[in-house]
Amino acid sequence: MKVEIKDLCKQFKDRRVLDHINLQIGTGKIYGIVGINGSGKTMLFRCMAGLVRPTSGEILYDGKVLYQDVSMPPNMGIIIENMGLYPEFTGFDNLKYLAGIRKQITDEEIRAAIERVGLDPKDKRKIKKYSLGMKQRILLAQAFMEKPDILLLDEPTNSLDEEGVGLIRDILKEEMERGALIMIASHNKEDISYLCDEVFSISQGKLEAK
Amino acid sequence: MVKSRDLWKVMFVLPVVLFRKCNLLLPVTGETLPMEEVFLKNIFMENALRIETNITVLMSGMLEIVIFSLLFGAHLYHDLYENSVYIFIRQKSRSRWYAKRAAELFLFSVVYSLLFVGGTFLLCRFYTGQRIDTETAEIFAVTYILIALFSFWITLMINITAVFTGSVTAFLIHYIIFMIFTALAIGFEGIPVINQFRILLKLNPAANLMVFWNDGIGRGLMPAAYFLVLCAGTYAAGNVLIKRMDISIENKE
């Protein structure tokens, strides 16, 4: 999988959130974007995921232009900061509901994804009763349960302890070896340098290689 | 994806119909009215143009439709603000998601209206004890089709407007506009411009919904065709909006 971003801009009225972003990434590495809150990391992910239309520029997936050749990006897993799951459902029910959209995986595979992040798939508690760390883990399971080709993880280490960050690192390595293209955004430089092979920095919507 | 709570919401109309219509039917059983008259009186309390009535009575007669809009006014909008990122990255296209959700809403309005209109019809049959003749059956069928289409149309509009305003404000906007249309439909004889240009009355959705049996509107098929056009237009406008909008929107609820 190869992702190419050409001269991408996103503007809201007179505020430019993404400013002529150019980027070429492919499988085999874990990429990181580091930047302070409001620098444009999440907006870049939202544009890449086909959730927000860019004002100008193009995003290409294996040479296919988003919104021209394809209406949505290919098989993608994502975590967006501050975007939770249904609080009234259990972790398993949340993932089952989402898995029901693509209908690619079985209940057994959903349970395996939940176990992989160190949670119990038989836990009957609703998400609203989960701790912040547990919520983050179930979001991670949601992102990779369908073995996506691209993983976009916005602040994946939020609310996780040292053991949790180590677990993410192991999972990301396995996903990378499976052939997924992985991109992580964080304001935490330490986490990014610990988890990623290549790092970019973003500031006021402008992306630079570090 | 239809959830069990959606089915419960559809069933909610049954106790409402039983309670409201039983209370309304009892006073008219003493009169020797034809069954279709009793039925029409009980669908919208009173026949708007034949009997003098006021807008408050008429709107309260629409309670079942209003309840449908309240129950399903966020049916599509719900996906757009809760869990939207995780739902939409799994879609093959936004249009397909919109088509599925709109089809669900249509199905709910069809079943809900059948329970509402059919339940009222059966109660009328039970209370009057009269035979169902062709004219009565025709009035039932037309009323059912119009109410199902209208419920779908106004609730789809509420869902689409909710993208900009939140579902509560969208609900209020559309029902206030509908009240204005209703007032114009009731008082059209006193409004010279409507009397001069009868097309204005035929374009009024409230008039098409409540007085479809009136000669000025056209009997049954024309209002049904008009509502079909309104539904198709609203669906198409919603499709354009959904394709172009930014999905990870702020929750306006």
Image: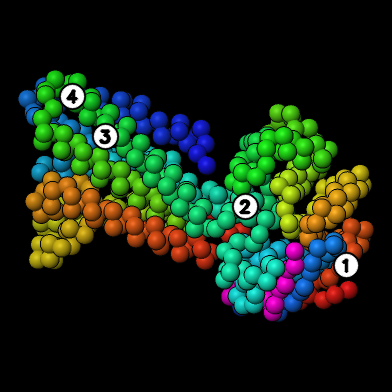
Q: Is residue B34 left or right of residue B114?
A: left
Residue identified by numbered label 4 = B125
Of B238 and A99, nearer the camera is A99
Which part of the image, by quadrant, shows the N terminus of chain A? bottom right
Q: Secondary structure at mark 4?
A: helix
Near mark 4 (Cα within 10 A), the count class, few <14, some 14-19 or many ≥20, is some
Q: Which mark is residue A198?
A: 1
Rendering coords of residue B4 (x, y %): 51, 32
| Relative to A125, residue B235 above or below | below
Magenta segment boundaries in residue numbering: A1-13
Residue type at numbered disc 3:
Val
| Mark closer to the observer (2, 3) | 2
Name the outermost residue toward the left: B32
Residue B47 in view in this figure? yes
| Relative to B44, residue B201 above or below | below
| Mark closer to the observer (1, 3) | 1
Residue identified by numbered label 3 = B117
What secondary structure do most residues of the magenta stretch adopt? Answer: strand
Q: Are marks 4 and 3 in contact (CB under 8 Å)?
A: no
| Mark closer to the observer (1, 4) | 1
Q: Is residue B137 left or right of residue B98?
A: left
